[in-house]
Image (spheres, rainbow, N blue to C red):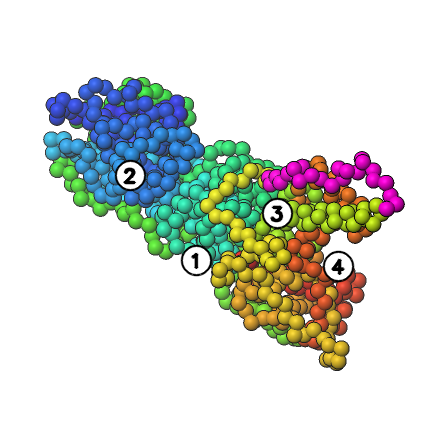
Amino acid sequence: MRISYHHANPQDGNESFLIRFERETPPDDETPCILVDAGSGVNLERLLRPTDRLVAICLTHAHFDHYAELTTSHRDSVPIYTSPTTAMLLEEVLAVASAEQGIVTTPETMSAIEPIDDWVTVTEGIEIHPVPAGHTPGAVGFLIRVTENGDTIRLLTTGDFSLTDVAGYPGFPTDDLPPIGALFLTASVQEEFSEELTEALIRILEAANRGSTTLVTVSALSGVHLSYLLAALVDELALEIPIRLVGQVAKLYATLEYEFPQVELSPTFDNPRTCLQVGGITIAGPETPTERSSAHLFAALKKDPNGCLVQLIGSGAPPVLTAGCTVYDFQFSNHPARSELEHVVKTLTPIETVIIHRHGGGAKEFNHLESCVWSPPDTDEHVLYEDGQWQTPPWMNWSGPPRNHSRSLMIGDLFGEFPLPSLIRVSTPDLEAEGIDLNRIKTALHITDESTVELQRTVSESEAASNGTAVSPEITAMKSTQTDTEAPAAPQRIDTVDIGFELGPDPGLDELLVAANPSPLTLIDEFARDQLKAASSQDSNEESESSATATTDPSQSDASPNSKDIVDTEETEDNEPAVDTHDVVTKNETGQPALVDAATDGGTSKAAPRDDTHTPSTTDTTPSVELTLDPLLVTLVEQSIARSATADCLETFIVTAVEDYLGLLLRDEAPAQETTDALDVGLSVSPALEQALIDVIDADDRFTSLSDLVVSGLLAVLDGGDDQTLSVSELVPYQSLLTAVVENADSAFESIESVVEAAVLLRLTIEYPDK
């Protein structure tokens, strides 16, 4: 037997290689060959001889640099062996790679993919068995067993690997393998990967836990790994943080059939802002938000000062460094440290070690390993084993005793039935096995053990009772995960549109625009047309009344725009693609767009009617607190109540919110009051329509700017109306406290209404985070 190998793409990824098994009397006069991985640059036409026969392709995992030339390397209907998990992923992965990176896939290649989890005979005397490799979900190495004249020779290909588990899949089993003669060692390293990953998880959870809208950008398969860890941590730490997976990450997660209740999937989306959530985590690819899903999501987040972008980069691409939101970046290459590579070689004690996935000079860094190290930067044939002896590299001066290969050559194969580790994913997450420092995360998030949390909850409730203030369970639970000095997450605005001038500030306007299925541009367009129609009608009446005494000026004949000059253009910053789902637009009796709630029967429900049972009559003498509240905020509360199917009426909702908020104020734990950002929009109109809108502003004293005009239109279309006046008798016991809050020298509140509105916004954030 003569065993040799070729590096198949040393000038590219150097992760692929061809192994040739040559016998003195080969069957059918052909030499069987196995290709391990098919990365960029692999060209079998240059490597295979006329007498060679490819008998199998072994694919270690579903990363592009390992399958890029899979189709061009496949021939003669040979099987493509891989793990069951990778086989599940390949259909989706190859479809995307074909569409976005131009690789070719054929039905013949897809039908040749064969999942294996046990010994498989690829040709007479040659068997292979997959072994878990960590690195990414479903990754494996391959143990190759060759029998010749009653003797057994073993080769092990690591593929990319990690010693830690990955998303429930076991890591590389260094201590559970039989003696190895030749080790093909992937020498890509990432020092302190577990520490870097733990730090990234801390930043993500910290941001979401304090109420930030958090976007994590990462490659698709690594996104599955990350979502697994985050879901396990949210469950372990009892955090109320929703996790949404978007695009390809969601598709691969669904393919692998993970089940975490905190995780929601959005394989496709129409509006990026529906995938982002205050206090939630959104995971999407690619790893830098410059294209596809992550680019569209980042465009919706980057101007939000309460937003957070976390980039996990494994390709070496340059990260985004600055934005209006908080920005982090971390290296995410799940490879072992150099010391772990040395541990693998020391444990497996191979006679020959072939360095792959490193290039020429870099591979020479491993020449100190206790074996013969092969790392030539070429595609030449290099003989590892011949005539019963392991070979010494020709460039290596061997001055030791004769080479003893008995560790891997066993008469009758005493290790033939050596139990090999399973590829099966564990059912319960093991964060320690995943390399995660749970104690470090708890410390960073100020999370103590359960008894301390319970004690803090008891103290908080006692303090509230002593102040005569009830504390809702939601606020108490939220406090249990915070330090004594840390305020609960402040209610934050949702950026809804980005079209070019400012509408606002106005509490609740952003949220109502999100709730309204018609786009803001549609609302503005409808209102603008109504204003033009009204202006045109008024001009006609004035001309009719003055026609007897006034002379018509021909130059004014073009003051009203011709319909052909009005151009409807709807653009988004990143030209977001249309996808599978669409907004539903309905019209009410007046022809205006109606708010649609898909959760209700028929999907066309408007906001719940206002509860006017507390409106005072002229004879009502019951003491009450008179409130004049923002109509948009009132509408938002009513919609939230209607969607949640609670028994609350508007007044009860307000009273409960005020009770909780006063308790926070008394304990100095209320979120700081921040000025509401103006809504930045950008309307593209024809010059004729722009001039017509300016004419409306000049003719109507109510409007001083285009912003005033559009806000007025949005209020009308959204049925916000005038400020809502309420009479709330249940607030009478709190009136003196509300007055004291307003009159406090350090107060940021200008009126009782502003205190009430802050309380309502906070309760909406806590009780309806997904609305």
Residue 486, given in percent of the width and then of the height, sits at 62, 58
What's the residue type where badge 4 is placed? Ala
Earlier residue among tags 4 and 1: 1
Q: Earlier in the sequence, mark 4 or mark 3?
A: 3
Image quadrant for the N terminus? top left
Determine crowd level at label 2: few under 14, some 14-19, many 20+ residues with C-alpha closer than 10 A.
many
Within the magenta stretch, is there residue 564?
A: yes
| Vertical side of 716 occupied by 284: above or below | above
Q: Which badge, 2 or 3, is on the more N-terminal residue?
A: 2
Q: Label 3 amino acid? A: Thr
Residue located 49% across and 60% down the image? 602
x, y percentage for residue 762?
Answer: 63, 61
Give the SS element for disc 1.
Answer: loop
- Residue 359 shown in magenta: no
Q: Residue at x 23, y 19 (%)?
A: 49
Q: CA distance from mark 2 to mark 1?
A: 30 Å
Residue for badge 2: 82
Q: Quadrant of the C terminus?
A: bottom right
Task: Give the residue number, with chain letter if any, for mark 1.
Answer: 261
User: Which numbered circle lies on residue 522?
Assistant: 3
Q: CA distance from mark 4 to mark 3?
A: 36 Å
Going from N to C along the chain, the mark reached first, 2 or 1, is 2
Q: Residue furthest front?
A: 548
Of circles 4 and 3, which is in front? 3
Residue bounds of the magenta highlight: 548-571
